Image (cartoon, grey):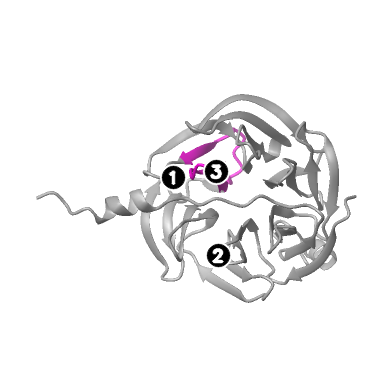
Amino acid sequence: MLEVQRIDAIEVGNTLGEGVLWNHKEQSVWWTDIHACKLYRLTWPGRVLEVFDTPERLCAFAFTERDDCIVAAFETGFALFDYRRGRILWRKTLLEKGCGVRFNDGKVDRQGRFWAGTMAEDGREEPAGVLYCLEANGVVSEQVKGVHISNGCCWDVSSSHFYFADSPRRSIYRYKFDARRGDLGRRELFARTMFGIYPDGATVDAEGYLWSAQWRGARIQRYSPDGKLAGAVPVPVSQPTCVTFGGPNMDLMFVTSARESLNEWSLDREWQAGNLFVFQTPFKGAMGFRFSTNQLLEKIAEPEPT
């Protein structure tokens, strides 16, 4: 195991905590409880917690250059959302509500595009998920089809490769990535998890190592750039969901978790399930990136032709 120390647990009891991100501008950590339609903001190290309601399930999000505004992958599509006023500023609906498919994991690349994928939640066997890319001008493209559950979106430190997991397949894939054009190239299998353990949300540290939350595995797994196991961090719950680095020195690791699907007996043992965990590490993360709202909001502000 890696020399990592758990230093805190934020007792929020999320049903499905997900999408944890560090906001270095505000020195705060953010995440969503998907099924509860909640967005969380925790200042660090002050530990002041704010909770914002969302108009539908918030599955993934990223920061923008605009105060109080995130780019969101709600269950049915993309949006710009003013979380303090509870207002949708722009929206692109891609799915019908109640269709059995919803958005799941997503992240912004270094060039400012927002990537997010979908998943089936109605028990269908065929892979109905799609990975989408949202450009700053509002154009949405389909990048990968035939996915069961989209997860683990992130890029290596040079933006030459894109990591993406399909959880039920227990597979983390690596794609060649054209950062200038935003195109995915050749795919290869990067890593597979053990039977009964599934790759969930992920991030890449400053050394280029991939950190993957292992659903049902009770740990965060670290992989070297060539896909070899490079240690693990145990967590006190079986369903960690996502991981990010943050803190003033970018050496803290924040991990979300879930209570979803745990029976009463399991919850008695995993009484911390659904909490946010904080670890002190000897590693450092890379800064996150922001989505630009300028082009979309300018379009909205344009007067109607007469």
Q: Is residue 87 visible?
A: yes
Q: Amino acid at mark 2?
A: Leu
Crowd around label 2: few <14 · some 14–19 · many ≥20 (10 Å): many
Asked where in the image residue 65 lies, by quadrant, the reply is: bottom left
Task: Examine the rendered structure and indicate whether residue 270 appears above or below residue 107.
Answer: below
Element type at mark 3: loop
Residue tagged 3:
110
* Residue drawn at point x = 43 percent, y = 51 percent: 292
* Disc with the residue nearer the chain's start (1 vs 3): 1
Q: Which residues are magenta?
A: 105-133
* Disc with the residue nearer the chain's start (1 vs 2): 2
**Where residue 189 appears, x then y in whole percent?**
71, 28
Q: In the rendered view, does 46 fall on the left or right side of 135?
A: right
What is the distance, in whole Å, between disc 3 and disc 2 at their CAs? 23 Å
Residue tagged 1:
95
Tags 1 and 3 touching, CB below 8 Å: no
Badge number at residue 203: none
Q: Residue furthest left?
A: 306
Q: Residue furthest top?
A: 186
Q: In the rendered view, does 114 fall on the left or right side of 246?
A: left
Asked where in the image residue 123 lies, by quadrant, the reply is: top right
